[in-house]
Amino acid sequence: MINKKIEEKFSEFIEHLDRIVKIPSFLQEDESGYPFGKNIQHVLEETLKICEELGLKTYIDPEGYYGYAEIGSGEKLVGVLGHLDVVPPGDLKKWKNPPFEPKIEDGKYFGRGSQDDKGPTLAAIYALKILLESGFELDYRVRFIFGTDEENLWRDMPKYVQKEEMPTVGFTPDSKFPLIYAEKGLLQCKLIAKNESGMVFKGGDAFNSVPSVITVQKTKSLLEALNKLNYEYIEKNENIEIIGKSVHAQVAETGINAINRYMHALNESGKETKSGKFIVDNIVGFNFAEPIFGEVKDEHSGELKFNIGKIEFTENEEILCIDMRIPVTYDTNTIIDKLTKKANEFGFKYESHDYLKSIYTPLDSPLVKTLMSAYQEVTGDFISKPIAGGGATYARAINNCVAFGYVLPDSPKTEHQPNEYIILDDIKIAIKIYMKAFEKFKDYN
């Protein structure tokens, strides 16, 4: 019965997903008057319009920082937090299909934001809609809270917390199943030094993405160094595209950082820069920046993760933009002190950019037990256990909240990568899991 209902509604789900994936909702602070640009405002308005079409009551923050859609009645409020902003598409040549022209192929739905986080957020909405149409009586309220600045500085959720009612309990469909019970601290910073190289350039798209390509001026010595190091590149007239592999910063060691490769090759070619010296001595050849911090890991959340997401050489300064994911049991100030000391040795000063503290939800908490039972009853998977993650999700935004799906344990995470996609069959399973979770929240105290 439930499978049939999901199939009946799935084409409508895809139509609605198309409407929001087509909007290039990455940060563009323009002259529109909206805090994060007209496209992010557009996707917020379009999502609320879809929710109204599905029978939910909606509200949009007059300042444009957030919106929400609500249904039900009662004192208990279950919050489902999703974000509608996305990271930039990066190198368009690496996309088989334009990132904001969604396409279904081989059972996969391709498009920027399909997995992070428009598809999973819409799946949760449809889960509740299908559940209600199947006769479920909702004796509590569900509020779908839509953020707009998750991929950058989180200027949205503090506005919500300041102005609105806090959920009793909640989850964010913005990670992996079965459940994320701990999230590392997120620290973003800049290292800034005087530029004495005479070079002016920039590369990378975001702090929290491993850069997949950097385009720089071609020189004979640079070509020789790239060949010697066996680094992949493409010659483009007077320029060179140095090739990497983009992944989310929370798993930076699994990608290939094009910035690191460029600075390594530049240093090898005889062109010295402070950034090149810092990267070669502390980053190249190491997965977790061990020369700076030593071994930093714990049993709950694993190793410290370190990513140089952006680089810029202005006429006066060298700027490295860094994203770190800090294990939950480590003191952030100690990490900052070690980085500051090492940076000073290479002529850099440390400048804070953003920080989100780590979170930890006990495995025996009612929330973890409720959601785990929903996952297990639908999937029959009693082997997969709650995990600690390096992502920074909206679970940090409110109390009593965890990241819950949508990616299944054996399925790939494609967020922040070219050709981002969701597996259609997996979305159907996620809808069933979220339906079961909403059923169980009826008895949650």
Image: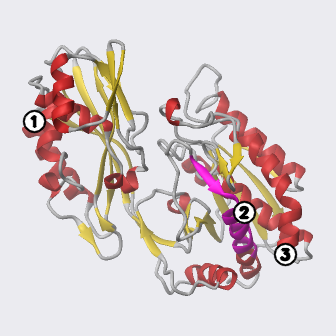
Type of amino acid under label 3: Ile
Q: Earlier in the sequence, mark 2 or mark 1?
A: 2
Type of amino acid under label 1: Phe
Closer to the camera, 417 or 152? 417
Q: Which of the 4 image quadrants contains residue 360?
A: bottom left
Type of amino acid under label 2: Ala
Q: Position of residue 400 (x, y in %)?
A: 56, 71
Determine the CA span between mark 1 and mark 3: 61 Å
According to the picture, the residue beneath numbered tag 3 turns out to be 2
- Residue 341 visible in the snapshot: yes
Q: Earlier in the sequence, mark 3 or mark 2?
A: 3
Badge 3 density bin: few <14, some 14–19, many ≥20, Cα 10 Å: few
According to the picture, the residue beneath numbered tag 1 turns out to be 346
Closer to the camera, 438 or 310? 310
Q: Nearer the viewer, mark 1 or mark 3?
A: 3
Query: Is disc 1 placed on a helix, strand or loop?
Result: loop
Badge 2 density bin: few <14, some 14–19, many ≥20, Cα 10 Å: many
Query: Is disc 2 placed on a helix, strand or loop?
Result: helix
Residue 404 drawn above or below residue 333: below
Badge 1 density bin: few <14, some 14–19, many ≥20, Cα 10 Å: some
Q: Is residue 428 magenta?
A: yes
* Residue at 51%, 30% in the rendered image: 93
Q: Position of residue 273 (x, y in %)?
A: 14, 26
Give the position of the C terminus as an image quadrant.
bottom right
Q: Magenta region: which residues?
A: 420-435
Residue 392 drawn above or below residue 330: above
According to the picture, the residue beneath numbered tag 2 turns out to be 124
Q: On the rendered structure, is 55 left or right of 205?
A: right
The secondary structure that dominates the magenta segment is helix
